[in-house]
Image: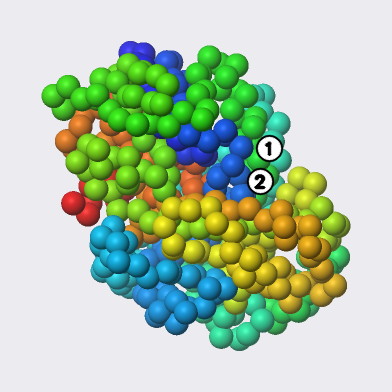
Amino acid sequence: MSKKVVVIGGGIIGLCSAYYLEKEGHDVTVIDKSDFKSGASYVNAGYITPSHIISLAAPGMINKGMKWMLNSSSPFYVKPRLNYDFLRWSLLFKKSATNKKVEASIPIIKDINLFSRELYEGMKASNEFDFFYKQKGLLMLYQTDKAGEEEWKTGIRAIKEGLHVEKLSKEAVQKIEPNVDLNIKGAIYYHSDAHMTPNEFMQQLKSYLEKKGVSILSNEEVKSFDKKKNKIISIVTKNKVIKIEELVVASGAWTQNLVKQLNINVPIQAGKGYRINTKKETGIKIPSILMEAKVAVTPMNGFTRFAGTMEINGINHDINPKRVEAITKAGEKYYKGLKFDAKEKEMAACGLRPCSPDGLPYIGRLNTVENVTIATGHAMMGWSLGPATGKIVSEIITQKKTSLNITPFKVERFS
């Protein structure tokens, strides 16, 4: 039965939810307070990452965060502040960062990533889109034996999960990356991963939805909800009152503040990431993560993107020049001869990734408001998990059996 569904959030999660909801025959409206041209869905590394089986809430992250807290150019920077939501999230993160919880989450993260990759490939194979998509895997490039050994442990665990992973010497890496002069000791090569050009896909998906009759409302901020008993009957924006039958909240880092109006607390912290693009010919063919610097490198359609850092510092889009400099220095350190110019650094952009305390997304219905579905908290895997999340959202609203077990993604698991 067709329903009037409003999706709050025009990023990859929101648009993918709209895509699968429209396919199920629903009357869909997508609302975003931006212009559908900026944010984390446009500035990310474009990775589809079955390799990323270890959640953000890993035991070592607490110690690393403490060590890096005083260094504003570090790969993982947390700015301490006396704020209830931040302090609660930090405590929940600490409780989640155990070997037992990380181990339990490995097959969950792997399965939803593989499912999402399959859905991307289905979209690519359809005649609906013509986007850049390559499965060339992911190289984890390391300069120290310690980093290599640490990553190889993850590689061995990924092999147990059925992924194809190799440990490569520097010479072996140079054979598959012959056009760059690498300053590395070696790499762990995950063959499972793919990559895309985010802006291109987002534009094509938005155009497709508009052609299919999905209403796209840009620069519209949701102000409040009209509730009757345990249902939302309409939402109020700056300019409109929109009647609804179902609501999907996919508003990323803003979700927590938005759903507080419904007396729900979904713990999220905004994790700011940066990107720098270069149109110079770099010779880079295979996406890579510069391990010690935690910088992602992606050869996209017509340019190469360097992206990285995780900055937990509230909701803001301030560009920290030290963090931009850290990314460019890392690129120049690993790729001999690579140089970024002042203009490329000036054009750096950032986006806010919604981080849950346990590294798993929130996907599912609220217990207390029966027509609200939440889809957020994907941290650095938002791009990777867009289609899988959108598909599951459409299955929830259409009351179909979900493609995956969504119990681990329960929205109110920290209540």
Residue depicted at 52% across the width and 78% down the height: 71
Given residues 212 and 191, the one toward you in this image is 212
Relative horizontal placement of residue 414, taking residue 12 as reference (left or right): left
Given residues 11 and 182, the one toward you in this image is 11
Given residues 240 and 86, the one toward you in this image is 240
Residue 375: image x %, image y %? Answer: 37, 40
Q: Which residue is mark 1?
A: 200
Q: Is residue 127 visible?
A: yes
Check the picture and name the quadrant holding the N terminus: top left
Relative horizontal placement of residue 13, taking residue 286 as reference (left or right): left
Q: Which residue is mark 2?
A: 196
Colour scheme in the image?
rainbow
Relative horizontal placement of residue 178, taking residue 298 as reference (left or right): right
> Would you call the spot at circle 2 few (<14 residues within 10 Å), some (14-19), or many (20 or more)?
many
The span from disc 1 to disc 2 (Cα, nearest Å) is 9 Å
Secondary structure of the residue carrying tag 1 is helix
Please say if 32 is above or below 149: above
Residue depicted at 35% across the width and 53% down the height: 268
Please say if 91 is above or below 379: below
The kind of residue on which mark 1 rests is Glu
Please say if the residues under marks 1 and 2 sit with CB atoms less than 8 Å apart: yes
Q: Is residue 189 visible?
A: no
Residue 158: image x %, image y %? Answer: 49, 65
Residue depicted at 69% across the width and 78% down the height: 186
